[in-house]
Image: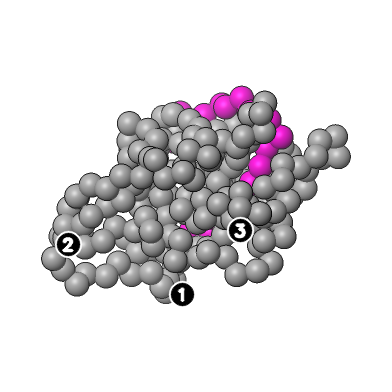
Amino acid sequence: MGSVTEFSQRMSPHPFYSFLKERSSRPLPGREAQFKMTPVPIGSDFTIPRNPPQTATPSAVLALLYPNPEQELNLILTLRTSDIQHGGQVSFPGGKQEKGETLEQTAVRETQEEIGIPEASISIACAITPIYLFRTDNQIYPYIGFLEAEPHFKPNLNEVEEVFSCPLKRLANGECIRKKRDRFLKNEFEVPYWDVHRVPVWGATAMMISELVELYKEFVRE
């Protein structure tokens, strides 16, 4: 199984794609960017584990972008169905790595299976910083991918309740960052989230978006 990692010759790549291809050879914003959207315990010294054990299950997700007619980028997100792992939450398409495939191939395959985007239409720009989910013992490897135009979604209704998009520019200007208090893991937390859907985008997905946004801000400044 293979995945397309370069734009077709019939269209020029989006400038942000080209930026990421070069930028990924240098140190990424990493955990510093991710921590901006990390839940913070209130009145407790509880620390969420961030370093995976060797037994952690490798998984991959895809932050997939497409341009509108004005070449402004939109980020694709999914709302999970309520009866699966992480049900009822907003996430990127993705899942567990299967035997014999690379993590990049996992991200692309899962995207096709979950929202119906053909593998051949996806161009991978780079990987960003992995995140460990200690409650499920998963090490998540995020990739940033691009489409040449707005796609036609065909969600797998067994896994995906809804597919929606958010302008990357809106995420970058900070207008949709909110905070709430929530209780989980027997502790109270201040939880930052992206207010771009009726369901708050928080946790690992919010943290991965934060790193993507930092890279986009660098691109805009250049």
Q: Residue at x 27, y 52 (%)?
A: 191
Real-space Cα separation, disc 3 to disc 1, in angstroms: 20 Å
Real-space Cα separation, disc 3 to disc 2, in angstroms: 32 Å
Quarter assignment of residue 121: top right
Q: Residue at x 16, y 68 (%)?
A: 44
Sequence-first disc among 2 and 1? 2
Q: Are marks 2 and 1 in contact (CB under 8 Å)?
A: no
Depth check, front residue: 2 or 92: 92
Is residue 103 visible in this depiction of the protein?
Answer: no
Depth check, front residue: 16 or 205: 16
Quarter assignment of residue 42: bottom left
Residue named by callout 2: 42
Residue named by callout 1: 54
Say which amino acid is labelled 2.
Answer: Ile
Residue named by callout 3: 127
Task: Specify start and end residues of the magenta stretch as a single range.
Answer: 138-159
